[in-house]
Amino acid sequence: MSKSKKRSPRIFRFAMRLLVFSFFLFLVSTISLNSQEININAKSKKIQEEMTTLKSDIDGLKIQKQELSSFSRVKEIAEKKGYTYQQSSVSANVVGVEQNK
């Protein structure tokens, strides 16, 4: 009385192979996509750090520009060149412009 082994149908074997292959493909694609996501996040962080650095450099240059173009700085340079500044009490009027009422 030996048990006879039943062979599984062909379609069942094909379905099992397809299932194993699909699982393997899913695993490989998930690992690949996670790897790409990590690389993209690293590049994004590096670019954000560069942007922050550039923004702080721009702010520093704006401050330097304001310091160099300040009235006291211009007056100091003008005095070194021999010019003098006299504040006048002259006011400007616009001539020839009609006002709409």
Image (cartoon, rainbow, N blue to C red):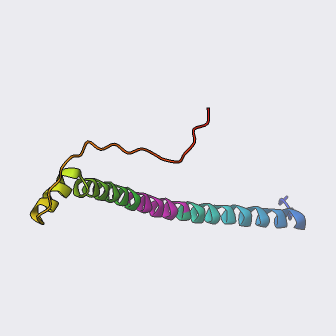
Whether residue 64 is in magenta: the answer is: no
Query: Residue drawn at (47%, 60%), measured in percent from left and top?
Result: 44
**Residue closest to the eye, 91 or 48:** 91
Callout count: 0
Determine whether, in the image, residue 17 is placed left or right of residue 56: right
- Residue 95 appears in view: yes
Nearer to the camera, 65 or 23: 65
Magenta stretch: helix, strand or loop mostly: helix
Q: Visible in this render: residue 5?
A: no
The magenta segment is 37-49
Q: Quadrant of the N terminus?
A: bottom right
Residue 78: where, in percent of width, then height?
16, 61
Residue 58 rendering spot, x and y as whole percentages: 34, 58
The image position of residue 2, as x and y in percent, is 83, 60
Task: Determine the image quadrant of residue 99.
Answer: top right
Q: Quadrant of residue 23?
A: bottom right
Q: Residue at x 28, y 58 (%)?
A: 65
As drawn, is 77 to the left or to the right of 56? left
- On screen, residue 51 versus residue 85, left or right, reads right
Looking at this view, name the residue that lies furthest to the top: 101
Q: Residue at x 48, y 47 (%)?
A: 95
Name the foreground residue: 82 vs 18: 82
Give x and y (percent) for residue 73.
18, 55
* Residue in front for this viewpoint, 58 or 24: 58
Looking at the image, which residue is at 49% across and 64% down? 39
Asked if 59 appears above or below 92 in the picture, the reply is: below
Q: Quadrant of the C terminus?
A: top right
Q: Is residue 47 left or right of residue 26?
A: left
